[in-house]
Image (cartoon, rainbow, N blue to C red):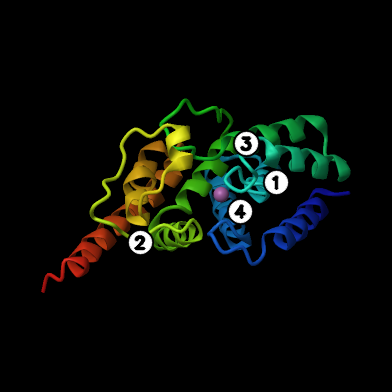
Amino acid sequence: MDKKQIIENISIYVKDKQSGEGSGHDWWHTKRVLDTAKYLAQEEGADLFIVKLAALLHDIADWKFAGGDDKASSKVATELLTKYGVDKESIDHVCHIVDNVSFKGEVQENKINTIEGKVVQDADRLDALGAVGIARTFAYGGSKGREIYNPEIKFQENMNFEKYKKNQGSSINHFYEKLLLLKELINTRSAKKIAEERHQFILIYLDEFYKEWDAKY
Ligand code: NI
């Protein structure tokens, strides 16, 4: 099967699996990550086939929804890619990206070490920023029964993975616990530019949010 056909088949599979998901990890998230990753891959000279596969499969069994199994996505990825006759080296590369791309609540050592991985990780992080990132934060919070905002609950600093999983703070707290930290974690120059713009947009949004919350006229 040629590369184009493999990408097409995997797109159909992922779209079918992720459609109609309401917490912000739906097919449209994957599609945006794919599109952004393609742009970044061209800017950064990364291998497009690996980037497309990893972008498509990066959330196929997200650990937040896979009962805590943080290798769930790469298991699905290995099965699929083997079925389509992708070579072992490419499968291992894609799986390494898929296993390590996610933000897990701490500024930990980044295991992503290839330009293809960096591009996909950046694309995923960019989708957590800006107007779309804000929408996804509230969608995810809502799916977990979290409040939009609660001024009585302070946001947490330096969260580890355990704290991050159990965290019950408001969606606005999540801006400080995750979104506003992302800019510093971006790998590539082309993504940094975009991250900076989206970061500024979130700051403007928060300003407006507090003004309205406090009825300041
Ligand atoms: Ni993602």
User: Which amino acid lies under the numbered mark 2 shown in the image of this protein?
Assistant: Ile
Nearer the camera: disc 2 or disc 3 = 2
For marks 1 and 3, the one nearer the N-term is 1
Is residue 196 among what the camera can see? no
For marks 2 and 1, the one nearer the N-term is 1
Q: In this view of the protein, which residue sits in the foreground, 25 or 118?
A: 25
Residue of label 2? 148
Nearer the camera: disc 2 or disc 1 = 2
Is disc 2's CB within 8 Å of ligand 1? no
Local crowd size for mark 1, using a 10 Å CA cut-off: few (<14), some (14–19), many (≥20): many
For marks 2 and 4, the one nearer the N-term is 4
Verify CB contact (< 8 Å) between mark 4 and mark 1.
no
Q: Quadrant of residue 68?
A: top right
Residue of label 4? 34
Residue of label 3? 70
Left or right position of 158 against 8: left
Is disc 1's CB within 8 Å of ligand 1? no
- Estimate the spatial distance between the alpha carbons at disc 2 and disc 4, rounded to whole Å: 29 Å
